[in-house]
Image: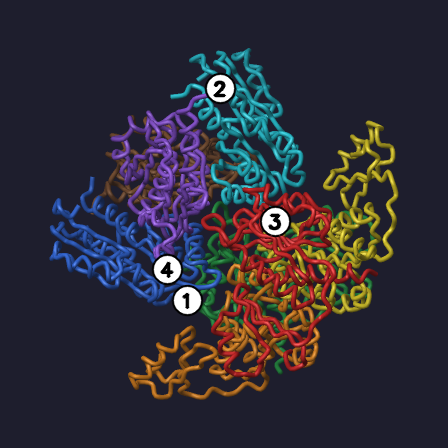
Chain colours: A blue, B green, C brown, D orange, E yellow, F red, G cyan, H purple
Amino acid sequence: MAAKGNNVLATRAEPKVFKALAKTKKFPKARYEEAAKAIVLEQKKLPISKTALPIVTAGTSDLPVAAEAKVTAEIMGQRTEVICDVGVAGIHRLFGHLKKLQKANVIIVIAGMEGALASVVGGLVSCPVIAVPTSVGYGSNFKGLAALLTMLNSCAAGVTVVNIDNGFSAAVTATLINRKIEEGK
Amino acid sequence: MAAKGNNVLATRAEPKVFKALAKTKKFPKARYEEAAKAIVLEQKKLPISKTALPIVTAGTSDLPVAAEAKVTAEIMGQRTEVICDVGVAGIHRLFGHLKKLQKANVIIVIAGMEGALASVVGGLVSCPVIAVPTSVGYGSNFKGLAALLTMLNSCAAGVTVVNIDNGFSAAVTATLINRKIEEGK
Amino acid sequence: MAAKGNNVLATRAEPKVFKALAKTKKFPKARYEEAAKAIVLEQKKLPISKTALPIVTAGTSDLPVAAEAKVTAEIMGQRTEVICDVGVAGIHRLFGHLKKLQKANVIIVIAGMEGALASVVGGLVSCPVIAVPTSVGYGSNFKGLAALLTMLNSCAAGVTVVNIDNGFSAAVTATLINRKIEEGK
Amino acid sequence: MAAKGNNVLATRAEPKVFKALAKTKKFPKARYEEAAKAIVLEQKKLPISKTALPIVTAGTSDLPVAAEAKVTAEIMGQRTEVICDVGVAGIHRLFGHLKKLQKANVIIVIAGMEGALASVVGGLVSCPVIAVPTSVGYGSNFKGLAALLTMLNSCAAGVTVVNIDNGFSAAVTATLINRKIEEGK
Amino acid sequence: MAAKGNNVLATRAEPKVFKALAKTKKFPKARYEEAAKAIVLEQKKLPISKTALPIVTAGTSDLPVAAEAKVTAEIMGQRTEVICDVGVAGIHRLFGHLKKLQKANVIIVIAGMEGALASVVGGLVSCPVIAVPTSVGYGSNFKGLAALLTMLNSCAAGVTVVNIDNGFSAAVTATLINRKIEEGK
Amino acid sequence: MAAKGNNVLATRAEPKVFKALAKTKKFPKARYEEAAKAIVLEQKKLPISKTALPIVTAGTSDLPVAAEAKVTAEIMGQRTEVICDVGVAGIHRLFGHLKKLQKANVIIVIAGMEGALASVVGGLVSCPVIAVPTSVGYGSNFKGLAALLTMLNSCAAGVTVVNIDNGFSAAVTATLINRKIEEGK
Amino acid sequence: MAAKGNNVLATRAEPKVFKALAKTKKFPKARYEEAAKAIVLEQKKLPISKTALPIVTAGTSDLPVAAEAKVTAEIMGQRTEVICDVGVAGIHRLFGHLKKLQKANVIIVIAGMEGALASVVGGLVSCPVIAVPTSVGYGSNFKGLAALLTMLNSCAAGVTVVNIDNGFSAAVTATLINRKIEEGK
Amino acid sequence: MAAKGNNVLATRAEPKVFKALAKTKKFPKARYEEAAKAIVLEQKKLPISKTALPIVTAGTSDLPVAAEAKVTAEIMGQRTEVICDVGVAGIHRLFGHLKKLQKANVIIVIAGMEGALASVVGGLVSCPVIAVPTSVGYGSNFKGLAALLTMLNSCAAGVTVVNIDNGFSAAVTATLINRKIEEGK
């Protein structure tokens, strides 16, 4: 893929993988995004989207998944805006961002623990919401299963779900949607 | 129990059970609460609580469990106020009841589907919240398991949980708490 | 909702519910969609979409869920095209529809049993795919759990998932996406 | 939070986290509670409760969770009394504490393995019992799941449950209840 | 088996099965034990055991399983004594039977809901306890799974477990043990 | 316990725990059983049983659990005979031990993987069989769950089950049974 | 399919489905196999296999699945020999059939409850064994899950598994294998 | 086994196990297959099969399991051909190998993530397919469970399944089948 001059993204890469890669000196333009645990090789700049994709997280522990979503979207040319720590236990913090959310074409919501944020956001906006359960939590969270089930059972229509911690797939889908909307048809 | 002149409550009783009981003419004061599927034999009036217990439900499908909680609390002398259909997909409806909730000594929150309402309420009040997951839902709801896990993983402190559809136990606990608070110590 | 002159859709309604409704003669324009088990009250025609939404099913047993998706999309003004019985065990049947799929803005894929169709379609197109696992199957299918897990673990990016048998939510999301694309931004 | 002069509690903190914090010398009053794995920054003394909160554990392996509950309650001004190793396999040990338990306003019961202690205590007292399943056990204990299910299915009314190992949430709830009772209403 | 003159026991037999059998008039000595849902054909009297086998149940809903255990033991010549409704939520009722239990060679404990009775009995006696979880309960009981896990994780040594509702196997095992003890070796 | 002069057994003890204990020089008679991972402090010799308890294992990987059972039985005075590696995939090896098994008062069967050995042994003998599932296996073994379910569903009557890897509890129960049989009644 | 003159097999068909079909008089050659719950339309006789396929069942309750396997194999021209009720609790019955099994090219083993028969047969023969778990059982059998896990974890190499109750797929696979062996290559 | 001059294969062996073995100098012909994590002691050459066994993998992460299958088959004399990275998200890559697959006597398909490849291959060929789910994936993959359920629910007849990551058992079965076919009967 890299040989063809494409942009390449390797998610879930430990720092030592990047170090080994860097030693080879094959891809001098490759960089390591620590928060996202991703290796990014941006060989051509794609056109930048007009609108930003809100990436909303419930807590600070969900940030690594948000970072994966962010770097994935951005290498595809999608501008992003991370809105973090607006989980349902302090729901007033979410309302400060309401206007921004209601103007978006599509929103990514990332939450662990009980994962309730996706339903709340889904009930406040009229655009599609892509929900990412995270493995943040303990005990009966069962490594993200609780948040996953919550999101699948969301009573808000317009919410679809990806695998636990899968910021990558959420970002690809959101970018595809937003790009098509900006292009119109 | 009935012979001792106590109040008796039989939950999860089908109408035909009450009919059979009624035929025996042993308990002429027994009545059937249809919404709650409960047989109630109130033989002595307990002192009525000063404050009302809010019983909050996410959707109309959760009402049978709310009815079970209501009849259980009331036979123990606890006044109740059912606030229904304020689930998180239309969260503004909840905010109309905020003052009432913030003045309560203890609150019961009943929700099926993804069960996110308990976390939201728990984040808005400073009193204990007793969460009742219901078996309302389908597919990956797994007969209430999704709502149960959501509530157990609530990021709002002060939320405790009872078994799926167990309006009875939630009401007993809430009444015990409220009674002690009204009595002071 | 009906009183305000809006279109109303009640999914998962047994025929007898519609019969009871019909007897009241309150909603003479309400009709019953048998395949979808839905009551439809279309009080105002919404503008019809330019492009059709492909609703792809793996087998004929998945058709009730496809019908629910179809009636949901159509009452929102979204044209649909159901492509059925193109499951992966006879994958050549799918290829006959490839062009149509590759021109779509968004696709709904509905599959029970092992639910593999979503991954295959997701690998063939570059638009978002909304995957609906169905409860079709037996034994270790566990009422749709097998198909649900398959779809959540799809190795094709761009695939998001809704609850088991939830044709309604898939259709709402797909229609939101397609409408925004047709409107452009 | 610390900047506002509030009391701050960080649970589930490894010793090295506290060491790093200590090095910064920002919070000289912060201390580390080893048994509870908690960092405590007590900046203002809250009024001390009149009555003590019994924290009952089934076995000595449950003590870390009891310690978390204890430090949480105490930083909120709630006096505690830990009664430990009174599990159901040696139930006579529990009976030695019966009077104390029957006078309490609210009780925390912490148990791993089969978690049966909550039901037994719940049957002996008439105040609310907050049950904390712990991940103590092996094999079919499934990291606390066995104890969690036991507690959720308790046949004793008045028992509510928090997440596995969640001494923090149990203590917050118990303190809220006890404080309101002492204040009366 | 019947042709050889042996005693025959058919458990889990609906009344209509017995009726059909009775019509054939092949086994005039066969009788139907309604509480146990068992068809019993006792063709030869086995020697009766000297000591009785205590069959202890937590609640009245567990009685069908107790009945299955009782009829199974008795057709093997084992005397039984059913002690019922002594569940842990009212543990004082159990203590009234303590002497009897402490003299037994082996005890069967039958419990649904949270199944805690097996641990409590196991802690009070020094003989083997055979625990039978029942499917009595609802919600997160998962048809006996909660009680099964409780019993498998019992902290009392000497407790072994059979399948959910399997009064038959518990009775066979207990009878084998008691018979060998009475015979000595 | 040790202070009273009793025999003490600590199972699941890592070598370093014993080393720390040895350093204290408090219990010079304590020894470490490496295969069983148990610390044994035998302060008084109990009378030795007349008959030996067969401890049967399916594979060599099950030996640590067999060792725990062996050391537990022996400290209680119960002689044992370990018969190992006679799993069902080479069932002829089992038949070489048949006579010995058929003369036993009670048998412990230890098996991981699919755990089928308990059923086979149970069908060949007429004494009680105590089945111990082990966590030996991988993939869909789910850490012993497969063997546990196999044993609980055994079609051979007389088989009871303990928790995964719980050689201790199996040995206690078997010893109690054998001791009572040898004493007679 | 029927129109092309092929043999057609519809499994899992209730009698009323066949009755409805029969009324249409479209397929006068169609017959209903009651034990297998299958509609069979044999329009051309396929060449009959030289060797018979052993279909081995653990208990009589497994016979419907054996019947489905038998009718499936036979319509494909594969001769079958059903060997039934040779489950592991009475393993001597199996040994009476050993020679026959050891001469087979491939064997189908069908078992519910704990499903141990597949491992035992797999250890006795050197040909492939196709294992079919059945939903026969109760309680912790979880509708065939116990047998399924047993078979997947078989310690005998050469055992592969199909879905619960899937006699059809086992028969198709076994027939494919046997046909190719008889044809040689 | 080694002493008898047989070929010996030890799978799931860490390198250090082989190093320890090598130090003993007992088996100078033993070699370590790193990709397969297997120790191979080939003491006699078995006759080589005429036809090759296709071992098909969905992704490169599945290669260790493919390596285990390959080394297992080859030590039994079965030639193999590994076809890798032809997963369903890029299904055109699979079609390049179609002819080869359609000529095979039996095929092994190895896939993690959603495991859909087995169904697709099963639908394209008319020989038996042995499916191996792998533990490759994360989140709701649950260590191979998702792929396992997918394969068990395959709508393509002729697909049978082995345990997660069990390349060994798949290879033994496939080799048995192919050998018998080549020998004919």
The residue positioned 50% from the left and 28% from the top of the image is G106
Query: First in sequence: mark 1 or mark 4?
Result: 1
Residue H82, how many percent across, how many down?
Answer: 30, 37
Spatial CA span between label 4 and label 3: 40 Å
Q: State how far apart marks 3 and 1 are (Cα).
A: 45 Å
Q: Position of residue G43 (x, y in %)?
A: 49, 12
Q: Nearer the viewer, residue H41 or B68?
A: H41
Which residue has dot 3 on it?
Answer: F151
| Residue C3 appears in the figure | no
Answer few, some or many: residues within 10 Å of disc 4's Cα (few below 14, many 20 plus, some between 14 and 19).
many
Task: Return the x and y of residue E63 as percentages of the image width and height.
Answer: 75, 52
What is the quadrant of the N terminus of chain B in the image?
bottom right
- Chain letter for mark 1: A
Res. E124 in view: yes
Q: Nearer the viewer, mark 4 or mark 3?
A: 3
Residue ID for mark 2: G76
- Secondary structure at badge 2 equals loop
Secondary structure under the numbered disc 3 in the rendered image? helix
| In this view, the mark in front (3 or 1) | 3
